[in-house]
């Protein structure tokens, strides 16, 4: 690691003007390219105290060995030079979008004497007009086949064209009227070029002119009783309308816009683009990238715009570009787009109407693309096997960790402190075995202490299960009385039935385990993993690897908890956020896995899933605390009847002052339920007067303590002074 102070420029060397800078490593390779409105201010940020830097920025500046810069006159020039250098040097710390596939385009070679319509992929060529991209090549061919009836442009290759010109016989399309046959002179080069230009105009969205012209010609042919010609024109109109139906109208007619949406997590980002021309979606494409630098959504949008329009000009850059977040600053990017188009370009965030609705659709596509990308990478058997082997090798384990448990702590400024436990078996999530913990040992914010408590509680339960089966020799009392909740199946807030049909226990019974990658018996085989009633045990399965979300302190706490319990056959590691370093117990230096390592990717997925599960639980607890109501404690009172009570009386305060008979007037509320509600509300408000549930009488405190009347023997009575009632609650 290099010390940034060793190559820091001397004071006054860096100019206070726009420019582009490059960080190089010790081998003179460019590792990062950036632009700035003021080089002096921007570069000064990189040479502050390392503790104040973002972890990924810290990694970059400690990897670099030198920095250099180039001064330009405007921010727009800086944007263009940054794009050129990123393309040239491919820096490892810059965001680089990669296409998730090679998208096909409908291309018209307007740079040839006889323009040709064809499917093209890859690098765009000068003088060729492109439409799309399309999801599939067959979609292009279907569209072209319909349009050739009206615009019989050449589609054959150069070899076929020359052979037809030599023999004087056109191809099959020339005979059936889907090619104007310029190869044999049926149409002049100028007329054929005009035909191709009309084809391009129609594809660009200017459809109304041609439809109206054909309809007028059809009417004229019918008036002149040229019915065969009128029928052909009718079929041509039908073909054009069918081609137009393939792309639905989503915006107002003649609207040209590109909509860009971004879906991201801490590690990766997916970008989806919808190309709208003439109010219709004419193409769609998507990119995925690793987030190897500290970057905001606006910066991701800026990089996407560079990728999308860096090689484009003219009409390829639309009049309007809609984005989820604006780059900062936005003016240079907007000016750059305007220069590439040659006229004004609007770069903005849609706020309402059809454009906002369409942006939401693009956003959903981006989210699905990111999920699909992660799923494809995680579901491959060979990839998962390699990932487990890489983890075993990096952590010096005896065998691949077929069961991995990961723990994370979540809280909001020390309130509602909770923890999560997620389980991955054979590289795949086992949601039926997820667990959630409430921190009970103390109050406040202390992630290290919380981690120690959670690991202790989880593995104390594991040892208790072993003791029941006779596998644990010591007679130590391992019961701690804690209870956990589970996030089983598709619902995160409740336990799901086990796979063999058994109902879950109060803590969420774990289902039987599926087949493993290696030849090993299922973990639930035999009576050792079954309770007397046949249900799988709650914490009976030991992992081969425990992963904690955090660095050295959290790892040390987890290892100390296992040592205190006498467990020495379970490996522990921690994955620190941002730098993605793997920490081991009693090691001063972390294990750094390659960025492209499948083992690192699996650990990241496990860590991110634990974080998601923990923060979901923490938010749910916080929301429940904010929404808590005295009616929540009424047994048997569901959400529907609670809403009916509040709607009838208007508020809990008015409901509290109502008599039992008045409560019974609410539809669906019987007398027994009304009495229960009255008692619960009275208990929830110690200062409220007593309620005689037999008669519905509201008593004042100074009335004294009423006795149970003979008319209603055994009926519960909530009465007494406030202190007495509070004593009953304890």
Image (spheres, rainbow, N blue to C red):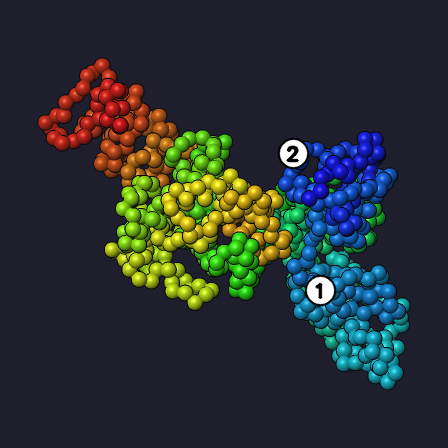
Residue drawn where x is 52% and y is 62% of the image: 385
Is residue 650 shown above or below 518?
above
Please, which residue is most extreme toward the top here? 702
Residue 541 seen by the camera: yes
What element does badge 1 sit on? loop
Of residues 334 and 621, the one drawn nearer to the viewer in this rendering: 621
Instruction: Residue 404 in the image: state x and y as whole percent.
Output: 46, 53
Which residue position holds label 2? 52
Q: Nearer the viewer, mark 1 or mark 2?
A: 2
Residue drawn where x is 79% and y is 53% of the image: 88
Which residue position holds label 1? 104
Q: Quadrant of the rendered structure where residue 511 is?
A: bottom left
Report, in whole angstroms, how far the alpha carbon at label 1 lies from the one at label 2.
46 Å
Is residue 665 shown above or below 531?
above
Locate the C terminus by quadrant.
top left
Residue 366 seen by the camera: no
Please, which residue is most extreme toward the left here? 710
Label 1 or label 2, whichever comes before in sequence order: 2
Residue drawn where x is 75% and y is 63% of the image: 122
Of residues 487 and 457, the one drawn nearer to the viewer in this rendering: 457
Instruction: Residue 22 in the image: state x and y as whole percent.
Output: 78, 44
Is residue 397 shown above or below 672?
below
Q: Residues within 10 Å of mark 1 (few under 14, many from 20)?
A: many
Q: Quadrant of the rendered structure where residue 40 is?
A: top right
Position of 616 compared to 536: left or right?
A: right
Locate the N terminus by quadrant.
top right
Of residues 655 and 448, the one drawn nearer to the viewer in this rendering: 448
């Amino acid at each position: 690691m290099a010390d940034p102070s060793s190559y820091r420029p001397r004071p006054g060397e860096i100019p206070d003007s726009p420019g582009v800078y490059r960080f190089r490593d010790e081998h003179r390779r460019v590792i990062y390219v950036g632009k700035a409105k003021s080089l002096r201010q921007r570069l000064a940020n990189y040479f502050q105290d390392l503790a104040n830097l973002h972890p990924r920025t810290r990694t970059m500046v400690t990897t670099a060995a030198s920095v250099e810069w180039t001064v330009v006159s405007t921010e727009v020039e800086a944007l263009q030079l940054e794009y050129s250098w990123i393309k040239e040097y491919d820096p490892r710390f810059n965001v680089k979008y990669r296409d998730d596939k090679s998208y096909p385009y409908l291309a018209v070679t307007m740079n040839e004497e006889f323009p040709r319509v064809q499917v093209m992929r890859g690098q765009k060529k000068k003088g060729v007009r492109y439409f799309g991209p399309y999801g599939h090549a067959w979609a292009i061919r279907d569209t072209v086949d319909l349009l050739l009836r009206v615009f019989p442009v050449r589609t054959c290759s150069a070899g076929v064209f020359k052979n037809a010109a030599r023999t004087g016989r056109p191809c099959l399309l020339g005979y059936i009227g889907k090619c104007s046959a310029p190869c044999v002179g049926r149409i002049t080069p100028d007329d054929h070029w005009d035909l191709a230009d009309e084809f391009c105009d129609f594809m660009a969205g200017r459809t109304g002119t041609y439809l109206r012209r054909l309809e007028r010609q059809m009417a004229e042919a019918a008036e002149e009783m040229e019915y065969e010609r009128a029928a052909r024109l009718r079929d041509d109109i039908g073909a054009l309308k069918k081609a137009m139906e393939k792309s639905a109208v989503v915006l107002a007619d003649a609207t040209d816009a590109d909509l860009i949406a971004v879906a991201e997590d801490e590690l990766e980002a997916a970008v989806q683009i919808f190309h709208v021309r003439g109010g219709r979606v004419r193409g769609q494409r998507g990119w995925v990238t690793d987030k190897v630098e500290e970057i905001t959504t606006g910066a991701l949008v800026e990089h996407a715009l560079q990728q999308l329009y860096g090689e484009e000009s003219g009409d390829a850059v639309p009049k309007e570009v809609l984005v989820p977040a604006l780059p900062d600053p936005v003016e240079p990017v907007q000016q750059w787009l305007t220069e590439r188009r040659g006229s004004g370009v609007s770069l903005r965030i849609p706020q309402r109407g059809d454009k906002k609705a369409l942006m939401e659709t693009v956003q959903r596509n981006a989210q699905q693309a990111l999920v699909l990308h992660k799923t494809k990478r995680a579901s491959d058997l060979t990839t998962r096997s390699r990932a487990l082997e890489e983890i075993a090798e990096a952590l010096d384990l005896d065998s691949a960790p077929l069961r991995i448990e990961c723990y994370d702590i979540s809280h909001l400024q020390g309130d509602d402190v909770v923890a999560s436990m997620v389980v991955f078996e054979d590289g795949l999530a086992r949601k039926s075995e997820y667990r959630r913990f409430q921190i009970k040992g103390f109050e406040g914010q202390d992630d290290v202490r919380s981690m120690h408590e959670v690991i202790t509680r989880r593995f104390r339960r594991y040892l208790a299960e072993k003791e029941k089966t006779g596998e644990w020799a010591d007679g130590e009392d391992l019961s701690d009385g804690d209870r956990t909740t589970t996030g089983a199946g598709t619902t995160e807030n409740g336990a799901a039935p086990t796979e063999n049909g058994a109902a879950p226990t109060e803590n969420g019974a774990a289902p039987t385990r599926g087949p493993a990658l290696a030849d090993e018996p299922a973990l639930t085989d035999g009576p050792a993993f079954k309770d007397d009633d046949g249900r799988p045990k709650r914490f009976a399965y030991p992992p081969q690897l425990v992963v904690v979300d955090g660095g050295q302190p959290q790892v040390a706490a987890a290892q100390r908890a296992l040592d205190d319990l006498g467990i020495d056959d379970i490996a522990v590691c921690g994955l620190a956020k941002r730098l993605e370093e793997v920490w081991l117990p009693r090691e001063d230096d972390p294990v750094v896995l390659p960025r492209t390592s499948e083992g690192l990717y699996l650990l990241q997925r496990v860590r991110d899933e634990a974080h998601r599960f923990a923060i979901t639980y923490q938010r749910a607890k916080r929301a429940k605390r904010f929404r808590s109501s005295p009616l929540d404690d009424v047994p048997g009172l569901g959400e529907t009847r609670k809403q009916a009570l509040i709607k009838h009386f208007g508020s809990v305060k008015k409901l509290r002052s109502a008599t039992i008979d008045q409560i019974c007037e609410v539809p669906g509320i019987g007398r027994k339920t009304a009495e229960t509600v009255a008692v619960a509300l009275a208990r929830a408000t110690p200062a409220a007067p007593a309620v005689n549930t037999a008669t519905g009488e509201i008593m004042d405190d100074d009335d004294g303590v009423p006795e149970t009347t003979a008319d209603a023997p055994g009926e519960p009575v909530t009465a007494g002074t406030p202190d007495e009632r509070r004593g009953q609650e304890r």
